[in-house]
Amino acid sequence: MAVIKRRDTIQVMVGNVPIGGNAPIVVQSMTNTDTADIDETVEQIDHLAAAGSEIVRITVNNDAAAKAVPHIKEKLMNRGVPVPIVGDFHYNGHILLTKYPDMAESLGKFRINPGNTGTKARDKNFTTIVEQAIKYDKPVRIGVNWGSLDQQLLAERMDANNKLDDPKSAKEVMLDTMVESAKRSSSLAEEVGLDSNKMIISCKMSGVQDVIEVYTRIAEEVSYPLHVGLTEAGMGMKGMVASATALSVILQRGIGDTIRVSLTPQPGADRALEVQVAQQVLQSLGIRSFIPQVTSCPGCGRTKSTYFQELAEEIQDYIKESMPIWSHVYPGVEEMDVAVMGCVVNGPGESRAANIGISLPGTFEEPKAPVYMDGEHFTTLKGEGIGREFRKILMDYIEKNYKK
Ligand code: SF4
């Protein structure tokens, strides 16, 4: 497997979570509850943290939300959930952070959108937020977003571009301005007195090629850790594939210290899906492991029955349900590979390559399922209870190889 050489960055601590400086790439997410609803927000943060979100962001958009933050923090601590909470501020962050010191103190980081700190007073408001970060010893994320890019800066750059003999495209100017906005804001924060190890940068866009381009550029310009993600990725399959595509290219270039997958949830869907997608991107790239991987074939005309699909799903669900306990009892189990294959064509090969694998009988094949363990044939299962017996063999393997 190709080794990804991570970009060197300063390390920033968000609560007790290190970001950058060769720390593992951190998975984060954001709630979609009304922050003022303390119980609902605590419940969702707890759920996201349990799913693997190592940092959780909440919106702090008004007085009620600001007042709720210390209570949210306290309730999480009482539940034994020490996940750092990040406050997302737009338009009135300078007012709320000054007015509610307990809220500022409770947060692990402040997210500032430099495009949304005001128009005429943008630098003054930005400075106020940075001063509060210094006062409470908190890091900030300067989160540039193309949908709310600093309009004053963009207009200046567009005007300057129009006067050139060979003007750039509007998209090029937009990308330049994204990078410039991030650099300008980080320089201003340092001038105000924020230490360089208190700053994280993001430059999010919703187009896959655009976000790859902008992160590639900003990575060459600053040494702060980068929070990477495709903004407004969309819903369902489109959002997951677009996010995975963008993140994969950026991460493969060694860029990115913390990631978020910004999915639009389907009504009633589990918010933690975005955490699972982020983890799966990191695991697919061989960067971090979170859960044993099940390799299964797509099936074809050689497998007319759905039996092997059902078994692959059963094993995958079993692993997913068991992980909250396994991760404590069986350290390292997340590195395990399991293969569930449909027939003898590729079955034995994939099964031998996995830690443990089963090759089910295809149509017209003898009704038996060889099981392989660490590359060797272990046993052959037959009859009705193949799924149950394979799970038992899997459990014995885990017990033997990963028990603390
Ligand atoms: S392993 Fe067998 S069943 Fe699965 S896709 Fe290949 S040929 Fe088809």
Image (spheres, helix red, strand yellow):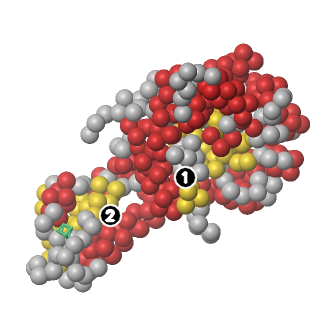
Task: Left or right? Give the position of 162 relative to 401.
Answer: right
Establish whether ligand 1 lies closer than 8 Å to the Cβ of label 1. no
- Secondary structure beneath disc 2? helix
The structure residue drawn at horizontal position 51% and vertical position 62%, both measured from the top left corner, is 236
Residue shown at 39% from the left, 48% from the top: 283
Q: Which picture quadrant has residue 307?
A: bottom left
What number is the disc on residue 51? Answer: none
Q: Can residue 157 be seen in the rendering of this structure?
A: no
Mark 2 or mark 1, which is nearer to you?
A: 1
Q: Quadrant of the N terminus?
A: top left
- The quarter holding residue 388 reads bottom left
Residue 116 visible from this viewpoint = yes
- The residue sitting at 84% across, 28% down in the picture is 121
Looking at marks 2 and 1 on the same chain, the residue that comes earlier in the sequence is marked by: 1
Identified by mark 1, the residue type is Ala
In this view, 155 is above or below 61: above
Q: Position of residue 373 (x, y in %)?
A: 19, 58
The residue at which mark 1 appears reads as 233
Q: Which residue is mark 2?
A: 395
Does 257 sit above or below residue 391?
above
Q: How many marks overall?
A: 2
Q: Where, by quadrant of the figure, is residue 288 drawn?
A: top left
Amino acid under disc 2: Met
Percent coordinates x, y for residue 183 in the rendering: 62, 23
Helix, strand or loop at mark 1: loop
Q: Nearer the viewer, residue 156 or 24?
A: 156
